Image (spheres, coloured by chain):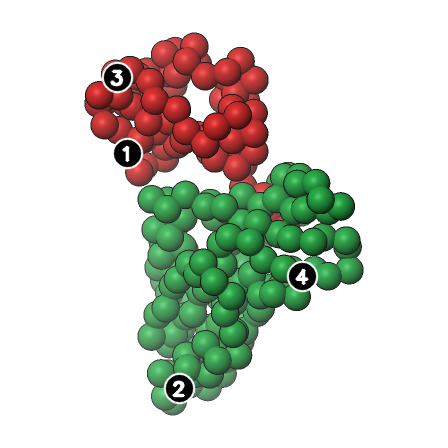
Chain colours: A red, B green
């Protein structure tokens, strides 16, 4: 089993895919080393949020995704 | 009466607002905002994507806050997702209240939050090329008005 990572909005283009499957458990460092470098660079920016199992993480570096969890990478919303 | 929805297909704001009005008997005023895809800028298609587990719950939470903050009888909040053509409605917010100020302010409040804080990502197609729409600083300034 694995953790599903969703690349939302413009991150989808950077990742070249809508989602990826990575081995569980997946923490912040594991996430950064699993995704493409361009995506990891975005993730390190404050304006990008991370949700795990349907909840936005207050501190994304505390990510601790388990088997079967869905992790969503949330770039800033588009506005006007 | 409260009606919060995400729609994948085109909708008729007038019909929804009329239905909403009828379910709030005794109202003193109703204020409605409808946002449409602009047609004067060369945009061929606008696409809104969302994240199901967060987007609708965040709209429900926004409606909760509006009911706490303003003296409302009813609130209608409809947002499109998917691909839209110029002139098609994207969003419709309508508030019913005993007095006008609550209705007007609630719509303004909901729109500012939907624009700057709801989980939607937009891209537009011009001359056959897709490009993502970046956040605008104006939207954050609009949001700050309600702090």
Mark 3 belongs to chain: A
- How far is mark 2 from mark 3, CA to CA? 52 Å
User: In the rendered image, which residue does mark 2 sit on?
Assistant: B22
User: In the rendered image, which residue does mark 1 sit on?
Assistant: A53
- Which of the two marks, 1 or 3, is nearer to us in this view? 3
- How far is mark 2 from mark 1, CA to CA? 39 Å
- Is residue B141 among what the camera can see? no
Same-subunit check for callouts 2 and 3? no
Tag 3–tag 4 contact (CB < 8 Å): no
User: In the rendered image, which residue does mark 4 sit on?
Assistant: B86
Q: Position of residue B53 (x, y in %)?
A: 33, 44
Q: Quadrant of residue A2?
A: top left
For mark 4, give the secondary structure. Answer: loop
Same-subunit check for callouts 4 and 1? no
Crowd rating for badge 1 (residues with CA inside 10 Å; few <14, some 14–19, many 20+): some
Q: Position of residue B57 (x, y in %)?
A: 34, 51
> Any mark on residue B124, and which?
none
Tag 4–tag 2 contact (CB < 8 Å): no
User: In the rendered image, which residue does mark 3 sit on?
Assistant: A24
- Is residue B49 among what the camera can see? yes
Residue at (73%, 61%) from the top-left corner?
B39
């Amino acid at each position: 089993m694995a953790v599903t990572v969703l690349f939302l909005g413009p991150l989808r283009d950077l990742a070249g895919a809508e989602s990826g499957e990575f081995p569980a458990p997946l923490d912040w460092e594991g996430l950064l080393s699993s995704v493409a470098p361009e995506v990891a660079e975005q993730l390190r920016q404050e304006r990008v949020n991370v949700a795990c199992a349907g909840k936005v993480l207050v501190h994304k570096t505390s990510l601790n995704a388990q088997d079967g969890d869905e992790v969503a990478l949330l770039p800033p919303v588009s506005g006007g | 009466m409260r009606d919060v929805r995400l729609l994948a297909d085109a909708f008729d704001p007038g019909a929804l607002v009329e239905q909403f009005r009828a379910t709030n008997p005794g109202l003193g005023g109703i204020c409605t905002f409808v946002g449409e895809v602009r047609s004067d800028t060369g945009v061929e298609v606008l696409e809104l994507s969302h994240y199901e587990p967060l987007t609708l719950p965040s709209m429900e939470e926004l409606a909760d806050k509006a009911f706490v903050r303003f003296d409302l009888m009813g609130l209608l909040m409809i947002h499109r997702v998917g691909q839209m053509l110029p002139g098609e409605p994207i969003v419709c917010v309508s508030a019913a209240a005993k007095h006008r100020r609550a209705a007007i302010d609630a719509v303004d409040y909901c729109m500012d939050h939907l624009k700057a804080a709801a989980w939607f990502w937009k891209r537009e197609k011009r001359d056959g090329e897709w490009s993502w729409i970046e956040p605008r600083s104006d939207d954050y300034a609009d949001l700050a008005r309600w702090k």
